[in-house]
Amino acid sequence: MDALPDTQTSMAKRPCPCPYQIPLLQSTPPPHHMDLLLESFLALSDSPSSSSSSSFSIDLSFDRLLESRASSDADQKLLIDRALQLGSDLLEAAKRSARKHASKHNSLAWALPPDLTIKVFSMLDTQSLCYAAATCSLFNKCARDPSCYADIDLTTVVPKVNNAVVSTMIHRAAKSLRSLKLGIVPGPTVTPGSCQTPGSCQPLVYTIKNSVDVSNFSWNDKRSRQGRESSILTRSCLSPLVGDNAAAGTLLRVLHLYNIERMDNTSLCGALSACPSLLDLEIVGLHVELRQTLMSVSANCHLMERLFFESSKIGRDDSLKSATCIDLVSNCPHVSSLALRGFKLHDYKVRILVKGFWKLRYVDFSTSYSITGAFLWNLGSSVGGNLLEVLILRDCMHLKEVEVARILTAVLAGDFKSLRHLDISNKEGLASEGDWYERCYKSRFWQKGLICVFWLSFQLKEVTLELIKCLTVGKIVKSVCHHSSAVIHQMLLFL
């Protein structure tokens, strides 16, 4: 009987602050134990009156745990780190559960089924699609559908898109990609050649001088050089078109590239080789050679319909050869809109292009050097050039006064029957016949009173005829007249 109390006393044990007991906290309890533990922990009162007392009691309990279970500073630090990790895990679990709850609520509250939601998202522009994808998990899941990225437009006014963003969107689109627009566009622009403003000649080449002030952007802002570099597109921005067996570029129809300074001929030509279905190519401000680009288009893009190319260095690119023009005309017979702005072009090369593309309706050679206007001789009455509706030769420094007279005489004779817009304005005046340096601001045939007769026949009952008069100050005056289809119309313009 005396031994019994000694035995009971020896079986009673107090918590021992030995370090070997601390790793036991690392073991993961069974699931039901974890559930009970969380339930007990979350059962703490959270009422406003007792919230402070609960927080205070937790502090005291944790302090007692540190004093009783950890004898050294290292052990106490280990317990504190574990408490922080456990609190972080619990916080992340609560956030995930909140997102799941919100997603379930949105799926019940959102009236449209996923297929119609995807259809709506596919009609949004790229920036709006990104905003919608960041709203909730339901929208994010719908916004990842490839059809939502069929038309990618990442053009910006200031550099803020990098290669990673472009690559992600192209990979999401995969074979659904139909249109891709990248680069820096200085301010709001109107697509050249559009029917709304056929005479648009807005310069699209981006420089710091002609950039607009958007959101107080400055190259000398507080961002580091690394931050600025991460928002600049490089030559590899088009590499996703070539990867995966060129799947993304297979059905691409529209490719517009604006002022990507680091783009080179090799990268651009490699991307064009992966786009056999390309119909619309617009290149502005890229440091690439005209001849190599047209050779790549001729070799790979046989369905091309619209070609717009604006040089980054006005008047310096003289690389175009006659053989390149002949190959382009032979391999791309469907071109109906051609714009080569800012290049050093000669009349005989331009004539090959204009006369060879028998579907050509829109021509823009603005700010091009060496063009005198001789390429238009006897062009309006022959196959190739007779379907021209828009002819823009704005600010062509070598455009001669006598050639302009021949153009208008040809119109008077009945050629260029489809021509509706003619722009020969030049702020530096027209070149005289004998001396290029002698500029003409008030031509002799203006003073005599030129009579232009437009013989036009239409199948519509009401038509709109836009007559454009080039004044001596280089401006455009538009006169709109309505006529009936039952008669031949004869308009007299006395300047």
Image: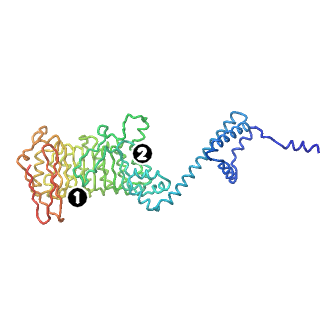
What element does badge 2 sit on?
Answer: helix
- Residue 318 spot, x, y in % from top left: 24, 43
465 lies above or below 163: below
Name the residue at the right extreme: 1
Q: Quadrant of the N terminus?
A: top right
Residue at figure coordinates x 13%, y 42% from the top left: 431
- The one of 33 and 400 positioned closer to us in this rendering: 33
Q: Residue 240, labelled with which disc?
A: none
Say if mark 2 contacts mark 1, CB within 8 Å.
no
Residue at figure coordinates x 23%, y 41% from the top left: 315
Q: Residue 359, labelled with which disc?
A: 1
- The residue to which callout 2 is attached is 163
Question: In the image, 403: left or right of 64?
Answer: left
- The one of 316 and 125 positioned closer to us in this rendering: 125
What element does badge 1 sit on?
Answer: loop
Question: In the image, 414: left or right of 353?
Answer: left
* N-terminal-most mark, 2 or 1: 2
Task: Give the residue type at disc 2.
Answer: Asn
- Residue 206 spot, x, y in % from top left: 31, 41
- Residue 69 spot, x, y in % from top left: 73, 38
